[in-house]
Amino acid sequence: MKLFHKPEPVVCGDCLSHIAFIMDGNGRWAQKRGLPREAGHSAGAKNLRKIVTACRDRGIRTVTVYAFSTENWNRPKKEVDGIMSLLADYLDEAMRDKDKNKMRVRVLGDLKPLSEDLIWKICDLEEATAGFTDYTLNIALNYGGRQEITHAVNELIAKGVTEVTPEDISAALYTGGMPDPDLVVRTGGETRVSNFLLWQSAYAEYAFTKTPWPSFGERELDAILKDYCGRQRRYGGL
Ligand code: IPE
Ligand code: IPE
Ligand code: MG
């Protein structure tokens, strides 16, 4: 009898410390199956749990996921409410499992327009996980790269700064103090950035796949990581 073994995961701790995902394709995944778009977001949230664990198993210390953009408010209220409710569930679960996961969770974005309940959950979870510094999950929520840069510059102006350096802006972003992403993966077939980590991705590598986010699995993650590890990042040099 022939035995098939699951291939060993690609371990990336040394060459990749920060991976970011544009989790796109939930709606089309659902529509293709005759399901409402909300079912796609639900399947996407389930996959988020799986991929965050998979990244951690591969030694990647920081994972950033694009959960809701500043432009996603333009969707029907029912869909927006569904996404917010899934996010609330995710935060509850992360709070419940924090001592098992030992993962810092941070939310990047403008929290003000979110519901009070969600804001409390975010603040509580950020505080409760602040000590877990080995692994970090950033959830970009009501996040837009242009909004983030504008916010950072306004913060600097409010402090009385009259001339800014790139380092000042980096430090004032929601990601201040974190390493820039090494690799940004977009699922769902579109080859655009959609206002995600505009400043931080100046020298990021990109990987685009047609696979919708709910179907994106470990095997494809490993193929992307293997490809990434073979790239030469030159940063404008030779
Ligand atoms: C990404 O999936 C999730 C969010 C933007 C919140 P979409 O909902 O954009 O799915 P598609 O791109 O319409 O398939
Ligand atoms: C980007 O996906 C935002 C998230 C994945 C949260 P969108 O579906 O909103 O992006 P566009 O509209 O295709 O550019
Ligand atoms: Mg989309």
Image (cartoon, rainbow, N blue to C red):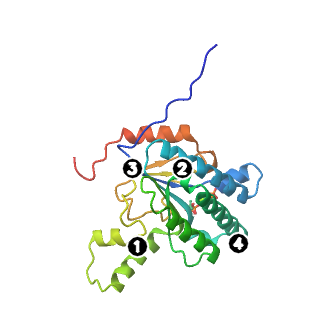
Task: Report how far apart the C-alphas of labels 2 and 3 lie in the structure.
Answer: 13 Å
Q: Who comes first in sequence, dot 2 or dot 3? A: 3
Q: Which mark is residue 52?
A: 2
Depth-wise, is mark 4 or mark 3 nearer the camera?
A: 3
Q: From mark 2 to mark 4, how far is it between C-alphas?
A: 28 Å
Please count the marks in the image: 4
**Residue located 38% across and 65% down the image:** 199
Q: Earlier in the sequence, mark 1 or mark 4?
A: 4
Q: Nearer the viewer, residue 227 or 54?
A: 54
Query: In this orientation, which residue lies closer to the viewer: 43 or 122?
Result: 122
- Indicate the quadrant where residue 77 lies: bottom right
Q: Please name the amino acid that badge 1 sits on.
A: Ile
Separation of disc 4 and disc 3 at Cα? 36 Å
Residue marked by disc 3: 17
Which of the two marks, 1 or 2, is nearer to us in this view? 2
| Chain-order first, disc 2 or disc 4 | 2
Per the model, the C-alpha gap separating discs 1 and 2 is: 26 Å
Q: Which mark is residue 149?
A: 1
Measuring from the top left, give residue 17's x and y in whole percent. Answer: 39, 50
**Residue 24 point in image, percent of width and height:** 58, 55
Residue type of the residue flagged with mark 4 = Lys
Residue at which label 4 appears: 77
